């Protein structure tokens, strides 16, 4: 168990800068998720933490020890790979104990450790098999077992679930979360799946183009995205971005919304919009904040009910997504499946702007912070 | 199980139309003709080696021996004259083994390590290094004869078995590197990363993880190198001494040495003996050969 400090880490390949000064610091026992689109540098950062790639600049500290130039095997970390990277010629047991063997742990201790890990992951019955004889989920468990056996200070997971089918992925996700709760280990976990990021992380680092866009708890990132990219990346379906004119009404800036009729939406931190009066901003509103009229919300501040025209409905079981156009932008609304919404009809919807955010139309940065 | 049986019966009992049968017969006829065509030289060699000289002179090429004479084989093996010595080809046969076995082993091992480095421990310029190695595959034998003779002289191993082993290793490494590199290209580099994090070093990873999965390509390389080196004549004739000639050179000498009439039966027996080891290697490991050659080549 150890803390991890990434201090202004840069990585260059010739002219191209892959990592442009990464600063992340996590406490012992914390679960950090690096998330971002492919090519954002998250895997490079992971490899740098592992020591599989050298950094061009900056420092990496594990347990307050500078390991920037330490070889991978002396960093006391274990990694779970996307392809599992199980040694094909070895049995499950040998796979799990290989790292211990390399560290000259006596055979009897190795056996005890293998048993412990196998029981923890429920793979005791597979110990004599070769990786080729295992299913995807079983391989995944063995790969985790190999990491757990050495009890390292830091665990790295490189997209460990992306090779599993959807159902198994959800199962393993829960299992990893349980395991983390049980063992209290420090974990850095790379994924491009924002649901994995939301469900697993203590903190999420959203990356793009070799830079950390935002580092925060899942809820912070969800409710308070630092910029347009983070807002659009996290959440499924994605946040709606509605270009809206800022108008002044009774001294407070409000947002003009043209659906079937035109209304003015109130905005929580309206004073931040003062400079934008007469201009267009991007209003960020999550689909679940646009719903069928809910009686208990009636009369609350920042709640506006208006008519919209339904373009398409997508029933998802628990909710029905309603697609409509507002200010010429296509938006998603999340409504109760019982609420009647025929394609082409005009229905009443409730816009709750209490958690709305505003972005500069040009730079994509948050305005209302 | 019963299900399986009934379906297989159905497949066998499928009605074959008349045309199908005709085509099938035609197919096998062609195959048999082609096979016979390829086997013919060997059959001629075999029956010629079993006739005596008199019968060869009077009979036709394809006529079967009236009685079997194995003395040409023993003569070829132990008493036929190759140049000025008359001890058969057996000493040279042993020479060939002394050249081939170490040369195959060393070139395969070096190729494996080269391929391992080029594919899985990429360094700055490793692709260039590989391209440079590849050029070695296209250098004709004749080109390196003189510089190699010079080098062997400097190293003090001219006309020795060691010298020939050296030549074959140097010349063979380009090919073996290519084979192993292509094979290891299909091994995920994450395997090496995982092993490094587990604490294994360069050679431990090679020995414990990479080599155990390399059987198909090792077989291919061994077959390739074995046949190449065993069948080599040019290096053998250029760089060997009188006592260190490989069997190919001795066979040539045997065929070209004649006192009185030509003993075709002895020539044929000697030629078959000289070809037996490569034949054996193909028979025992042939199925791996095709499998290994296509590995890596047809990677998705």
Image: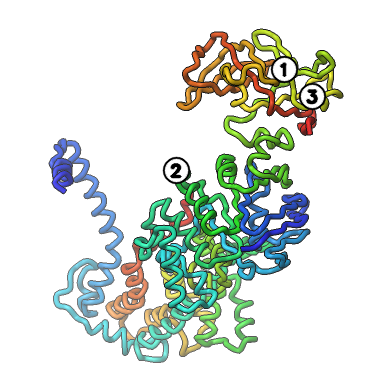
Label 1 and label 2: CA atoms lie apart by 43 Å
Side (left or right) of A42 relative to A81: right
* Of the pair A333 and A264, the residue shown nearer to us: A264
| Residue B140 percent across, percent down from the top left | 56, 67
- The residue positioned 77% from the left and 52% from the top of the image is A21
What's the mark number on residue A219? none
* Of the pair B59 and A328, the residue shown nearer to us: A328
| Residue A39 percent across, percent down from the top left | 65, 45
* Of the pair B141 and A161, the residue shown nearer to us: A161
For marks 2 and 3, the one nearer the N-term is: 2
Q: Determine whether the residue tagged by mark 2 lies in a helix, strand or loop.
A: loop
Q: From the image, tell me which residue sits under label 3.
A: A270
Q: Is residue B123 above or below residue A167?
A: below
Q: From the image, tell me which residue sits under label 2.
A: A165
Q: From the image, tell me which residue sits under label 1.
A: A265
Q: Determine whether the residue tagged by mark 3 lies in a helix, strand or loop.
A: helix
């Amino acid at each position: 168990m150890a803390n991890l400090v990434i201090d202004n880490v840069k990585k260059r390949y010739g002219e191209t800068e892959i990592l442009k000064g990464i600063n992340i610091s996590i406490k012992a026992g914390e679960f950090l998720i690096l998330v971002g689109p492919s090519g954002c540098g998250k895997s490079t950062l992971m490899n740098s933490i592992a020591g599989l790639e050298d950094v061009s600049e900056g420092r990496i500290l594990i347990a307050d020890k500078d390991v920037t130039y330490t070889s991978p095997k002396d960093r006391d970390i274990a990694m779970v790979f996307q392809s599992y990277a199980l040694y094909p010629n070895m049995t499950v047991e040998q796979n799990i104990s290989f790292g211990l063997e390399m560290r000259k742990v006596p055979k009897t201790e190795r056996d005890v450790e293998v048993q412990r890990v196998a029981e923890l992951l429920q793979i005791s019955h597979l110990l004599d098999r070769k990786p080729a004889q295992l299913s995807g989920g079983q391989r995944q468990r063995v790969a985790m077992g190999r990491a757990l056996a050495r009890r390292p200070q830091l665990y790295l997971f490189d997209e460990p679930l992306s090779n599993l089918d959807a159902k198994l992925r959800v199962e393993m996700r829960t299992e990893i979360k349980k395991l983390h709760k049980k063992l209290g280990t420090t974990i850095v976990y790379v994924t491009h799946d924002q649901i994995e990021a939301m469900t697993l992380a203590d903190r999420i680092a959203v990356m793009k183009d070799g830079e950390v866009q935002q580092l925060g708890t899942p809820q912070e990132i969800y409710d308070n995205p630092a910029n347009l990219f983070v807002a659009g990346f996290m959440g499924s379906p994605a946040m709606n971005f509605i270009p809206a004119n800022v108008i002044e009404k009774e001294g407070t800036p409000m947002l003009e919304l043209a659906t079937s009729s035109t209304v003015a939406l109130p905005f929580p931190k309206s004073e931040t919009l003062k400079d934008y009066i007469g201009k267009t901003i991007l209003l960020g509103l999550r689909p679940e904040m646009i719903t069928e009229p809910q009686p208990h919300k009636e009369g609350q501040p920042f709640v506006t009910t208006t008519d919209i025209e339904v373009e398409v409905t997508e029933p998802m079981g628990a909710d029905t997504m309603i697609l409509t156009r507002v200010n010429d932008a296509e938006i998603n609304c999340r409504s109760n499946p019982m609420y009647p919404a025929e394609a082409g009809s005009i229905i009443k919807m409730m816009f709750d702007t209490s958690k709305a955010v505003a972005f500069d139309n040009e730079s994509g940065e948050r305005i209302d912070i | 199980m019963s299900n399986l049986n009934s379906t297989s019966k159905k497949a066998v009992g499928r009605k074959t139309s008349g045309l199908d049968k005709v085509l099938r017969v035609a197919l096998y006829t062609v195959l048999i003709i082609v096979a016979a065509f390829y086997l013919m030289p060997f059959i001629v060699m075999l029956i010629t080696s079993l006739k005596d000289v008199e019968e060869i002179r009077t009979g036709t090429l394809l006529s079967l021996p009236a009685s079997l004479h194995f003395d040409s084989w023993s003569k070829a093996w132990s008493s036929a004259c190759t140049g000025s010595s008359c001890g058969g080809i057996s000493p040279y046969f042993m020479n060939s083994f002394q050249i081939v076995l170490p040369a195959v082993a060393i070139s395969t091992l070096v190729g494996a390590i080269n391929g391992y480095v080029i594919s899985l421990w990429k360094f700055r310029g490793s692709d260039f290094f590989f391209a440079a190695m590849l050029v070695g595959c296209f250098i004709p034998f004749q080109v390196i004869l003189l510089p190699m003779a010079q080098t062997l002289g400097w190293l003090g191993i001219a006309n020795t078995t060691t010298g020939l082993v050296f030549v074959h290793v140097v010349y063979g490494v380009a090919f073996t590197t290519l084979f192993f590199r292509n094979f290891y290209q299909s091994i995920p580099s994450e395997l090496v990363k995982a092993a490094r994090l587990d604490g294994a070093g360069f050679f431990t990873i090679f020995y414990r993880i990479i080599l155990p999965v390399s059987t198909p390509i090792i077989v291919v390389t061994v077959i390739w190198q074995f046949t190449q080196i065993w069948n080599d004549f040019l290096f053998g004739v250029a760089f060997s001494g009188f006592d260190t000639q490989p069997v190919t050179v001795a066979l040539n000498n045997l065929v070209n040495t004649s006192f009185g009439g030509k003993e075709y039966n002895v020539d044929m027996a000697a030629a078959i003996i000289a070809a037996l080891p490569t034949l054996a290697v193909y028979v025992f490991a042939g199925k791996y050969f095709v499998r290994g050659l296509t590995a890596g080549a047809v990677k998705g």
